[in-house]
Each structure stands twice: as C-alpha cells, then as structure tokens.
Image (cartoon, rainbow, N blue to C red):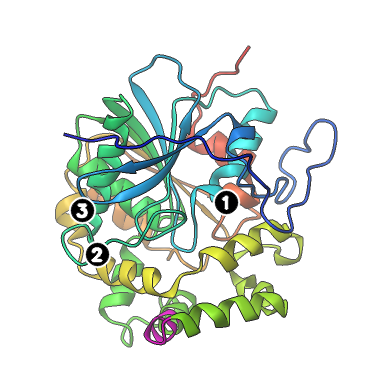
Amino acid sequence: MSILAETRQTTPPRALPGRVAPAQGPPVRDCYCPFPMTNDARGLRLTTSSMRLSRATVSVRHGRRTGSDTATILLHGAAGSWTTWTPLLTAADSCGLALADLVIPDLPGWGDSPFPADGPSRSIEATAAVVAEIARALGYTSWTVIGHSLGGFVALELAASETQATVSVGLVSATTYSVIDTVRHPVARCAVLPGYGALLTVMRALSGVGRVGDGLIRLLHRTNLLRLLAAPLFHRPRLVHASVVDALATELRPQAFAVASALAGGYDADRLWSRIQCKVRAVQGDTDIFVAATDAARLHAVIPGFEHTTVHGSGHFAHVEQPFATLRHLLPGLRRSH
C-alpha cells in the first residue's frame, strides 16, 4: 500500500534565476518560447509534498482537484524536473483550458527527489511503479500520463504495466528505440543519434569524476558557454528564455543521466510496449536531435493506438518552445474553464 508520510507547503516560492516575465496582455499564440520556466508552485495553484513511498522518497507538485478519480500526470525528462512543465501549464491557463487534477513528480534522482540507493528502485519498471504509487497515494485510481524525453519512456512503461489504470499517453520527444539502440551499440549506431551519443559520452565521463563534473557544468553556465553547448536541443536557441538555460544548469546531472541511459539500454521495449492498450499520442519537434525518423514507425508497429505529429519550429522541448501547439496535439479534448 502506498504511504503518504509527509505533506508540506513550501515557503513562498521564488522564480528560477534569470526568469523573464511574460509580456502583459494576451499571449501571442504560437510565438516561440512564449513563457519562462518557474518554480512558483503556489502561483500555479499547486501544493508541494514530500512523499515517502515503498521504493523511494519523492517530491511532488499536485493540485487543482476537481473530484475526479483520474489524474493528469506529467513526467519530466533527463536534465529536468517538474519545472519543465511550467510553460505548458502557463499556456493552458492563458487560454482557459481545464488542465486539472495534476500530479507532477520529480522522478527519483532528479529535482528535489534524492537519488535512490542501489536496488530494485533503479529500473524503468520500478520508476513507473513509483509514479503509480504517487497517484494512488493522492487518491487517484486512473490517469492520463504525459512524458517528455526520459519521462516519455517511463510513461510507456506505466501504460504497459498499468493497462487498466492508464487512460491515455502523451509523448513529447520521447526517447525510445533509437536511444535504446545507441546505448546498446554506441559505435555501430553512432550515426543514428550523434547528438545523443556525444552527450552520453560526456555525461559518463563527468559522472566518473563526481562533484568535479557538477562543478564544470556550473562553470560552463557562469561563462555563458552552456547556452552555446545546449543550442542543438532547441530550434531557435537565441530566443530561449534564460530561465530554461538556468534550469538545465541545475538539472543536468551526469550520474543520473548515465544511470537512466544504462537502464534504457537494458529495457525489452517490444515485449513490454506491446501490452499497451490505450491511445498514445506523440509529438516531436522538426529539429529534434534525440528522436530518430524511424522511432514513430517502430512504435506504431508495436502499439495499435499510436499517433504521431511533428511540431514545426521546435527542437527537443516542444512543450517549452511551442506549448500551444503541443497542447492542441496531445490534449485535443481539453475543455475551456469558466
């Protein structure tokens, strides 16, 4: 049984360093990167809870309860935390969409959630089980789950292992087959995702030097080199909010990245994803360097309810770069709030 051991409201939140306030007045729909990232959970009508579960202790932002027993779970990617979803939430709020019953965890090892000890919690399957335990501890019996990058990988495992509870899946640039292939065969498959392969090599090297690696990332950020190095992740890197680069500097964790990649490489995708029974809607940016052109076809061959759309003018972070388009494609049934 899930145990909610501790729930706490945070002290008054502060914005991420470098936060740029959105322009006054109605937002310009479909302009590039229209909103910054923020860690202002209270301003987004969310509560922050520390949850001590059977497999891990995790930090979760949740709220906007409607009385429904179905949650909307948002799962961040590697080098991310719950804050990666704040531009999407702001976009939904700005156009009156009813994005409610939210559950947004910091996955184990990321954000405010500590890195799990060696053992069964360090697997894709166990990470998905933690997500299900969070939702049930908060009183939900079913969920729609949306995942970005690594979070999309976890979302697919959640749908495969919880077929009755998972209503639908949304994927934003989910890391799937091409990442698995690159981890398993880094030399033979290096041309498939060269950007990911290069990053993985760097993250493994930095993971091996411990805190020195973390310090190097902070140094790159202070010298403004991190924005340059992260440029391939975005369609128009010069227009990305400073808060997005600040978040990358905070959340780019070599050890967690290397471990997550290794776990993906050992995952039996065809066998497990063939169990998925719900609809899966996927979007990816037209300049995304972490998703191969063959991924969508391979997912469609395994998942009968798979749909795929390309979001133009976006790289690996469509929910940050083009949040309105991402909302339209992933959640076409959203109702306007009154």
Q: Position of residue 92 (x, y in %)?
A: 61, 31
The residue positioned farthest toward the right in the image shown: 24
Q: Amino acid type of disc 3?
A: Glu
Whether residue 254 sits left or right of residue 85 in the image: it is: left
Residue named by callout 2: 117
Q: Position of residue 193 (x, y in %)?
A: 43, 74
Q: Tell me: residue 250, above or below residue 35.
A: below
Magenta: main secondary structure equals helix
Image point (80%, 31%), residue name: 26
Q: Earlier in the sequence, mark 2 or mark 1?
A: 2
How far is mark 2 from mark 1, CA to CA? 32 Å
Q: Which residues are magenta?
A: 203-210
When asked about the image quadrant of residue 70, the answer is top left
Q: Earlier in the sequence, mark 2 or mark 3?
A: 2
Q: Amino acid type of disc 1?
A: Ala
Q: 140 and 231: which one is in front? A: 140
Whether residue 250 sits left or right of residue 133 in the image: it is: right
How far is mark 2 from mark 3, CA to CA? 16 Å
Q: Which is closer to the viewer, label 2 or label 3?
A: 2
Q: 153 and 62: which one is in front? A: 62
Report if residue 303 is visible in the image: no
The residue positioned farthest toward the top in the image shown: 338
How dense is the environment of label 2, judged by Cα within 10 Å: few (below 14), some, or many (20 and up)? Answer: few
